[in-house]
Image (cartoon, helix red, strand yellow):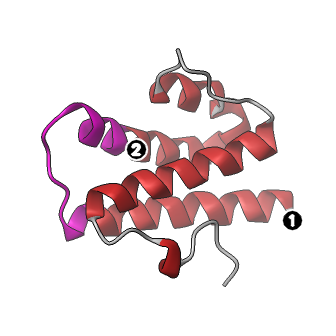
Amino acid sequence: QDSVVSDKDFPRNARESIFYLYKSLMRLLERITRKFISPHHTFREFAYENSKILGPLYRHFFELTKIVEKLRYSKYSPDERDMIICKQLSSNIEAGLKNRNG
């Protein structure tokens, strides 16, 4: 399967894996949209700026963004359920982008 991230590249730690997934999706979006996140942007701003291009996929990306923000700005420790949710959101976004862009 041709995916943004492969299982062999995944960090073993759930927290790092979720950040890795998100970063990979951000890079994919940057390549597609040519809108790059700058140091003063928040993740939500980046998500919002890409909302029109993402269309219905925005909902998935925004949900993933909220999870990443929770991990980044709190002491929350993700569990296996969080990892499953993040992988599913990522897969939905990736599949939708691939279907749209051929």
Label 1: which secondary element: loop
Q: Which residues are magenta?
A: 66-82
Q: Position of residue 13 (x, y in %)?
A: 28, 66
Instruction: List the residue tagged with mark 1.
Output: 102
- Residue 70's spot in the image, x, y percent? 25, 38
| Residue occupying the point 34% across, 63% down | 85
In reply to whether residue 38 is colored magenta, the answer given is no
- 10 in relation to 27, above or below: below
Which residue in the rendered view is the most extreme toward the bottom?
A: 1
Q: Nearer the viewer, residue 53 or 45?
A: 45
* Residue 49: % across, % down: 63, 24
The residue under the point 43% across, 66% down is 87
Q: Give the secondary structure at mark 2.
A: helix
Residue 20 in picture, x, y percent from top left: 46, 56
Residue bearing the label numbered 2? 63
Is 12 placed above or below 62 here? below
Residue 73 belongs to magenta span: yes
Relative to the observer, which residue lies in front, 30 or 54? 30
| Residues packed near mark 1 inside 10 Å, few (<14), some (14 to 19) or many (20 plus) | few
The quarter in which the N terminus is drawn is bottom right
Q: Amino acid at mark 1?
A: Gly
